[in-house]
Image (cartoon, helix red, strand yellow):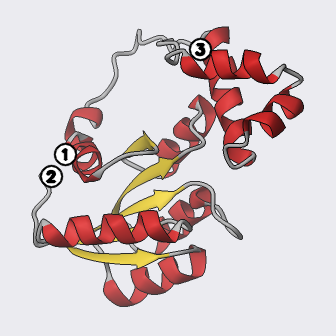
């Protein structure tokens, strides 16, 4: 199902500036964009505004984005959802998709990334071949994801993240300057 600019989209993120920036960008493209900062505000908007789709932050104060996906799926089964988060991992991506999200995008993502994720939904809906083998991420990829989660938990403070990871600050900086491993 191709996105139409007349559709209503709900943007759920606890970071106010990021949420407001997305709301403005979607409004400029002709969508009716609504913002919500948490689970309660999002559910209220889903019940009253009945959006066609939602972009949901995974990690928020109170109930998480995964809990919101489950509740939204019950309240509005036709609503399409994309999970957008700075805490990307294979496990949470798999869980979000199992619960009904059509895509999982890492932050920072812009409006084009989000629109493309909704438009690729049909491609992703094609059944996987029976012989499809799930490949676990490499150790390097798992390390990179863990480092970024810890750094995000430390609000970008390199020294604090290095301390929590048991690394020297310079070692952590070198690891962060590398591109993430593909697998």
- Residues marked 1 and 2 touching at CB (< 8 Å): no
Q: In this figure, which residue is indicated by the disc labeled 1? A: 119
Residue 180, above or below 147: above
| 181 relative position to 34: left or right | right
Residue 108, above or below 132: below
Q: Position of residue 13 (x, y in %)?
A: 50, 65
Q: Residue at x 48, y 11 (%)?
A: 133
Badge 1 density bin: few <14, some 14–19, many ≥20, Cα 10 Å? some
Task: Tell me the distance, in whole angstroms, between the alpha carbons under discs 3 and 1.
Answer: 27 Å
Q: Position of residue 72 (x, y in %)?
A: 48, 69
Q: Earlier in the sequence, mark 1 or mark 2?
A: 2
Q: Earlier in the sequence, mark 3 or mark 1?
A: 1
Q: Position of residue 3 (x, y in %)?
A: 14, 57
Q: In this figure, which residue is indicated by the disc labeled 2? A: 1
Q: Residue at x 31, y 71 (%)?
A: 23
> Is there any visible trace of residue 9 in the rendered image?
no
Of the numbered discs in the image, which one, if any, rests on residue 50?
none
Q: In this figure, which residue is indicated by the disc labeled 3? A: 136
- Element marked by disc 3: loop
């Amino acid at each position: 199902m191709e996105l139409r600019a007349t559709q209503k989209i709900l943007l759920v993120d606890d970071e106010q500036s990021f949420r407001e920036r997305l709301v403005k960008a979607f409004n400029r493209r002709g969508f009716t964009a609504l913002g919500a900062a948490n689970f309660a505000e999002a559910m209220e908007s889903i019940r009253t505004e009945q959006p066609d789709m939602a972009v949901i932050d995974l990690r928020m104060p109170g109930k998480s984005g995964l809990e919101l996906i489950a509740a939204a799926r019950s309240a509005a089964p036709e609503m399409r959802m994309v999970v957008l988060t700075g805490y990307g991992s294979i496990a949470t991506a798999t869980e979000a998709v199992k619960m009904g999200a059509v895509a999982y995008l890492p932050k920072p993502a812009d409006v084009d990334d989000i629109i493309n994720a909704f438009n690729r939904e049909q491609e992703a809906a094609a059944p996987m071949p029976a012989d499809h083998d799930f490949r676990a991420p490499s150790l390097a990829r798992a390390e990179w994801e863990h480092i970024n989660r810890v750094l995000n938990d430390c609000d970008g403070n390199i020294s604090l993240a290095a301390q929590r990871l048991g690394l020297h600050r310079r070692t952590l900086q070198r690891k962060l300057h590398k591109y993430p491993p593909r697998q």
